[in-house]
Image (cartoon, rainbow, N blue to C red):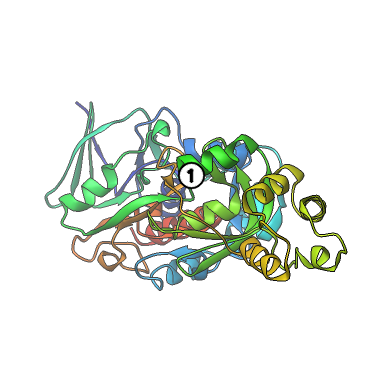
């Protein structure tokens, strides 16, 4: 067995861990990253369809969910999207903006992992891959027992991620470690996940898989206006993924399938009011197959003004109760995690265990879709790296 001594040990070579390591290394700390996978940044590489939506230029504390909505403010203010963009430009990585302030690599997500690994290398960080951890102890310092080696350091940073995408190696290790040291965990759940519909709605709509429409979806007093995609098992697309982070199992969701449109006005004004007229009107506003199907299931038995008023109401308030989400297998992130009341908002250090830090997805801070979770990784990683 080899015994290694460092100033800072970081568990996990994801976005937050790599950022933290680079920042700590720049300050002259002897830093090691311990990662059980065979390479760093595996989740970065599959993000954004392989292009990595690495931040959002409009990222603000309002874009995050936490039991303490104020917790993220300090770290986000001290490491902003502009700071990460400056790093991207320093490394001459070409990028572009998509909708709603989302920034993506022009080439590949590997540009981001290459950047982070180079920053770590330049800061003298040592990375140990294929290194599973058996046990963590604390005496006068932290002792990490790996399968072969033993690591000692005064500071330990937990950047092990959440439970989402288990096929990429996600585990509950970070939460178990927090509990070992007496920290509270806010209940975890899949977030940014597609919905599964019940058997009746699946039979009614899911043969339309691949059809998408611009909608407004609402649940639990939160609304999102983006596209919705019908899948083989239910609903997905940006609007649905956003909503899933706020949805409680068993609760209904409302969908406005024609935002800001008076759909039935043309039918009311027509001298002939029948199904054929209605279908023609709906298909000018919605994708044709979806319009036809939705009308087949919701059209009134007559075409009186009262019936059309009710049809208009349903267009803007189509109510469904999803059976569930697709769970951690398809969730982009994990909501909940290490209770923010346990941590310093400035440094991410445990209030009860000096030298113990938690950053990134393992913490109870969850971003909206569109680059915000990466921004939290950069901001929380930088905060801990500057303090450890």
Q: What's the residue at 61%, 37% (across, down)?
A: 50
Q: What's the residue at 36%, 68% (across, down)?
A: 345
Rendered-image quadrant of the N terminus: top left
> In the visual, does 374 lie left or right of 358?
right
| Residue found at the far bottom of this picture | 70
Q: How many residues crowd around disc 1 within 10 Å: few (fewer than 14), some, or many (20 or more)?
A: many
Inspect this view and state whether residue 292 appears.
yes
Residue 383 pos. (x, y %): 41, 62
Residue 160 pos. (x, y %): 35, 44
> In the visual, does 329 lie left or right of 207?
left
Inspect this view and state whether residue 89 appears.
no
Count how many numbered circles sit on residues in the image: 1
Q: Quadrant of residue 56?
A: bottom right
Q: 144 or 204: nearer the eye? A: 204
Disc 1 designates what residue? 197
Q: Compared with residue 366, is residue 142 higher up or lower down, i.e. above or below? A: above
> In the visual, does 354 lie left or right of 16?
left
Mark 1 residue element:
loop
């Amino acid at each position: 067995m080899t015994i290694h001594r460092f100033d800072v040990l970081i568990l996990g070579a994801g976005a937050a861990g790599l950022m933290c390591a680079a920042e700590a290394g720049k300050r002259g700390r002897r830093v090691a990253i311990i990662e059980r996978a065979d390479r760093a940044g595996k989740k970065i590489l599959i993000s954004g369809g392989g292009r990595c939506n690495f931040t959002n230029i409009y990222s603000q504390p309002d874009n995050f969910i936490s039991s303490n909505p104020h917790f993220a403010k300090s770290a986000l203010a001290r490491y902003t999207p502009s700071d990460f963009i400056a790093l991207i430009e320093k490394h001459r990585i070409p990028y572009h903006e998509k909708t709603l302030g989302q920034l993506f690599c022009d080439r590949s997500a590997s540009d981001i992992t290459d950047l982070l690994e180079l920053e770590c290398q330049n800061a003298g960080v040592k990375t140990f891959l294929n290194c599973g951890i058996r046990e963590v102890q604390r005496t006068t310092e932290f002792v990490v027992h790996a399968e072969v080696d033993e690591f000692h350091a005064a500071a330990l940073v937990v950047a092990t991620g959440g439970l989402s995408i288990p096929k990429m190696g996600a585990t509950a290790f970070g939460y178990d470690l927090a509990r070992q040291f007496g920290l509270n965990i806010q209940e975890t759940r899949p977030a940014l996940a597609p919905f599964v519909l019940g058997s009746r709605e699946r039979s009614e709509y899911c043969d339309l898989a691949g059809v998408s429409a611009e909608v407004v979806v609402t649940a639990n007093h939160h609304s999102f206006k983006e596209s919705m995609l019908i899948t083989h098992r239910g609903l997905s697309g940006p609007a649905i993924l956003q909503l899933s982070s706020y949805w409680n199992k068993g609760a209904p969701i409302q969908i406005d399938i024609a935002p800001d449109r008076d759909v039935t006005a043309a039918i009311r004004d027509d001298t002939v009011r029948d199904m054929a007229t209605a279908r023609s009107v709906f298909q000018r506003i919605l994708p044709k197959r979806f319009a036809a199907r939705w009308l087949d299931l919701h059209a009134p038995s007559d075409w009186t003004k009262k019936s059309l008023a009710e049809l208009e109401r349903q267009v803007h308030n189509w109510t469904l109760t999803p059976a569930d989400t697709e769970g951690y297998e398809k969730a982009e992130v994990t909501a909940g995690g290490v209770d923010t009341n346990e941590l310093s908002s400035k440094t991410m250090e445990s209030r009860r265990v000096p030298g113990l830090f938690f950053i990134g997805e393992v913490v109870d801070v969850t971003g909206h879709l569109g680059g915000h979770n990466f921004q939290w990784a950069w901001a929380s990683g930088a905060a801990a790296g500057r303090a450890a």
